[in-house]
Amino acid sequence: MPLGLSLICATPAAAEPISAEEAQRIREEIRLLKAQLARLESRLGPEEEAAPTATSAPAAAPAPPQASTAVAAAAPPPPAKAAPETGISWKGSPQFTSDDRAFKVKGRIQADAGYVSHPPGSDDKGFGFTSEMRRIRLGGEGKLGSGFGYKLELELSDNKVDLVDTFVTYETKDWLVAIGNQNQFQSLDELTGDTTGSVMERAAFTDAFGFERRLGISAQYHHKDWLLQGGIFTDDIGALSNSSDGPSGGDENNSFGVDGRVVFAPKVDDTQLHFGASGHWRTLKRLADKPTVYRQRPFLHGTNSYVLETPGLNVDDEVNYGLEAAAIRGPWHAVAEAHWLRAVRPDAPDVGFFGGYAEVGYFLTKGDTRSYRNGIFGGADPKRPFGKGGIGAVQLNLRYDYLSLNDRSAGVLGGRQNAYLAGLVWTPINYLRFNLNYGYLTYSPGVAADGVFDDYNLHVIGTRIELDF
């Protein structure tokens, strides 16, 4: 008889004796049921306090509307949205990113050594062997979110500390606006970073014509192959500081200028092309109280002796303009620039100077090429870095550099340079470069012994190790 039927029949009113065998069978069924219950209990886990039910307590009366509102107000708020995670990547130094915000430490080390031969008859100690820490730079850049960003860099150079790139930016779609100390879109060579250039120093006209960062506001519009840049600038931060008070700076410095540049950079098949033009006007205002001198070193910055130098000129305004052309295809690149400067004098004829260069470069290592972005050259990203199956990127560059500070029609003699330069650049890994340069410089004429102009030639050798992150 099944267990359920046995239990129904086994009532006090109708109890009947059962056999020993039947009793044993019932006990076995009970034992099996207990085992099944135990297994079910183990699956349920520890016993929890049962929630009150309608049968264990009387139902609560419906709450009035005010009570319902109070209960809703006392309900816990929904969980807060989790903060964006902070990502860390490596670009020569740690870069932190979170949503549309970012921060990166920046730094630069450049150590130079070189040799400049002496002009005939000169005992100037500035020639010969030279060495220096060309630049030591430390700063940071970041994005604040909603399109705002910033950059702040301090540089130790020429035994003084200067603020270099120091500005706040706002970027949206094709527009970029910057306020602060910044470059004024002078030329392709000036805007290309000093740690990504083809040779150790920029073209001679960039220093001779006084290209530098200045305080101002600028705007850039970049759409497809076109880049338009322009701004209004005063002077560099150092010249505006109170320590420069007087005819040449500080709160008396009211000079300002307008600068603009346009670039057309189409890519035709595998060739990146670049065509640019820039124009610049500056009024010196009170700075005209002090004579203006245009001059240049013999390529290396390590010597402070100048071989091209004009006499002091009474200049009210400066007008200069330049043309740029470049191309990159595989391991090859070529670039040329020309720049003209006109110094406007109130009491004498205007003075005109000219400078320019032409260059070709080739990577000796397979797969390497020169990068290009936003209207300027970049560095090389070695395809086979040192220690990872290769030796890094090796590039050979040849440059012709011309500068004339002569204007005989205006009665000004400052000298003329023809420089033939060769540079070998080794980039073993990203952010690290070694630079070896040789230059043959001819002057017709140049400043020789005792400030006398003469025709002569110079040999220049320069080396540099540079770390940039």
Image (cartoon, rainbow, N blue to C red):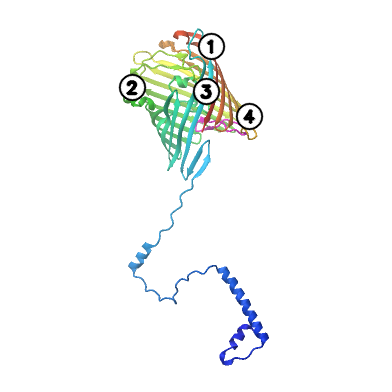
Where on the picture, by quarter, is residue 213? top left
Task: Determine whether the residue tagged by mark 1 lies in a helix, strand or loop.
Answer: strand
Task: Determine whether the residue tagged by mark 3 lies in a helix, strand or loop.
Answer: strand
Check whether the beta carbons of the residues at disc 2 and disc 3 lie within 8 A of each other: no
Q: Specify whether 32 is left or right of 96.
A: right
Q: Which mark is residue 105?
A: none
* Membership of 383 in magenta stretch: yes
Check whether the beta carbons of the residues at disc 1 and disc 2 lie within 8 A of each other: no
Q: Which mark is residue 365?
A: 4
**Region in magenta:** 367-384
Out of 10 and 453, give the one closest to the viewer: 10
| Mark nearer the viewer, 3 or 4 | 3
In the image, what residue type sits under mark 1? Asn
Check whether the beta carbons of the residues at disc 3 and disc 1 lie within 8 A of each other: no
* Membership of 101 in magenta stretch: no
Residues at marks 3 and 4, CA–CA distance in whole angstroms: 25 Å
Q: Earlier in the sequence, mark 2 or mark 3?
A: 3
In the image, what residue type sits under mark 4? Thr
Residue at (60, 71) in percent of width and height: 39
Q: Is residue 449 above or below residue 7?
A: above
Which residue is tagged 1? 457
Q: Earlier in the sequence, mark 2 or mark 4?
A: 2
Residues at marks 2 and 3, CA–CA distance in whole angstroms: 37 Å
Residue at the extreme front:
20
Query: Pointer 1: residues within 10 angstroms few (<14), some, or many (20+)?
Result: some
Q: Earlier in the sequence, mark 3 or mark 1?
A: 3
Residue 238 placement (x, y as % from top left)? 38, 26
In the image, what residue type sits under mark 3? Asp
Task: Determine whether the residue tagged by mark 2 lies in a helix, strand or loop.
Answer: helix
Query: Pointer 4: residues within 10 angstroms few (<14), some, or many (20+)?
Result: some
Which residue is tagged 2? 285
Which residue is tagged 3? 112
